[in-house]
Amino acid sequence: MRKISCCSALMLFLSVSSAVAQTAHETPEQFQARTKWWRAAKFGMFIHWGIYAVPADSTDLEGHKRIAEWYFSNKQLQVKDYEKFASEFNPVQFDARRWVATAKNAGMKYIVITSKHHDGFSMFDTKMTGYNVVQATPWRHDPMKDLAAEC
């Protein structure tokens, strides 16, 4: 059986996520081959990460506990207030090499990451919107590039 590297899988999933607004032109055979590989791989890392990590602490926000991303709707937070979290997102301890090494050392065959969540924030550099990790945060870094390079 052909082994597909962690990097190949990451790039596959990143390319699929970046084409969300496009019509899929995948043949049934291509879909079956991709599905077969994924089922054979069995073990991978799923990363759900974005500016919704900013309020994932125990401090108060206008009298409400800041508990992860779901409070956006549960606490009826205004979009303008939620978008301010981008200016606080500064994960200076992010280490793509360590994340990828952890996956590989555990025997994982792929990494899937939320590169753009339903909040509209892109965790990659894009010219489509300024609401992205490179342009809207003090960090100004593209973690998707780092992860792909480390794979």
Image (cartoon, rainbow, N blue to C red):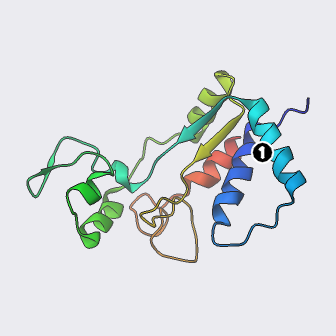
Question: Is 23 displayed left or right of 17 in the figure?
Answer: right
Residue at 41% x, 48% y is 91
Farthest residue to the top: give it: 106
Dot 1: element: helix
Q: Amino acid at mark 1?
A: Ser
- Quarter occupied by residue 84: bottom left
- Quarter occupied by residue 74: bottom left
Q: Position of residue 50 (x, y in %)?
A: 43, 53
- Quarter occupied by residue 89: bottom left
Residue at 10% x, 58% y is 62
Report which residue position mark 1 lands on: 8
Residue at 20% x, 57% y is 75
> In the depicted view, which residue is nearer to us: 107 or 143?
107
Q: Are there few (<14), some (14-19), or many (20+) residues within 10 Å of tag 1?
A: some
Q: Quadrant of the C terminus?
A: top right
Q: Quadrant of the N terminus?
A: top right
Q: Position of residue 27 (x, y in %)?
A: 87, 60
